[in-house]
Image: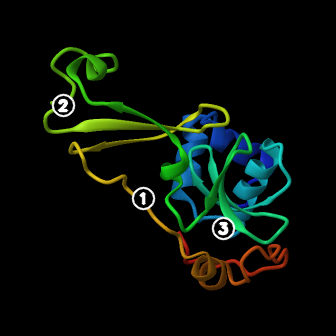
Amino acid sequence: MATHYDQEVLSELLDGALPATQLRSMMSSYKDPGRFDGMVAVHQKRVSWDDRILLPYGEGLFIVETGEGERIVRCQCGHSFGDYRVNWKLSALVFVRDSKELIDEIYPNMMGCDPNWMEMREFYCPGCQLQLEVEAVPPGYPIVFDFEPDLEAFYEEWLGRPVGAAPDKGGTEDEGFR
């Protein structure tokens, strides 16, 4: 039998503030069919902008649908990175750690990578300077486009509704979904 969690519990889950026993119980029990919508609601309450969140996309990043019907990547601060099908990192602030001195700023001596073999790219939001992602790649490697979600398939095949449609409050629970 699926369990339902209220907004307060989901908010604590997002914040990493659930007691270990409750978290373990939540992870091992059947999943709440409304968990995705509940988590989106928690995120939506925390942002200052009104555009509807379609999908949490990364730490501090969301795919949203604007009032004009565009689907874009937006930071929690409200900064827009543009169309979600284009790599948002191309519009981010980037800091590259490509020397021993820069790598040693974050790793103890002899624990960091060799800058001749790898560089670390830190991606920041131009609006709030929140660090959004780090990638470790060989020097000169193209910026990685992590993934382009198929929003239509996710909503229609997994959630059973069109993209952006409100959740069905009387939906059925799939006991086998974990």
In terms of secondary structure, where does tag 1 sit? Answer: loop
Judge by depth and name the residue closer to the eye, 136 or 19. Answer: 136
**Could you tell which of marks 1 and 2 lies nearer the N-terminus?**
2
Camera-nearest label, 3 or 2: 2
- Amino acid type at circle 1 is Asp
Camera-nearest label, 1 or 2: 2
Q: CA distance from mark 3 to mark 2?
A: 49 Å
Q: CA distance from mark 1 to mark 3?
A: 32 Å
Vertical placement of 132 versus 55: above or below? above
Question: 10 Å neighbourhood of mark 1: few (<14), some, or many (≥20)?
Answer: few
User: Quick check: 176 left or right of 110?
Assistant: right
Q: Position of residue 76 (x, y in %)?
A: 70, 43
Residue lying at 86% horizontally and 54% vertically, measured from the top left: 50
**Could you tell which of marks 3 and 2 lies nearer the N-terminus?**
3
Q: How many labels sit on residues?
A: 3
Q: CA distance from mark 1 to mark 2?
A: 22 Å
In terms of secondary structure, where does tag 3 sit? Answer: loop
Q: Which of the numbered marks, if any, corresponds to residue 146?
A: 1
- Amino acid type at circle 3 is Ala
Q: Which of the numbered marks, if any, corresponds to residue 2?
A: 3
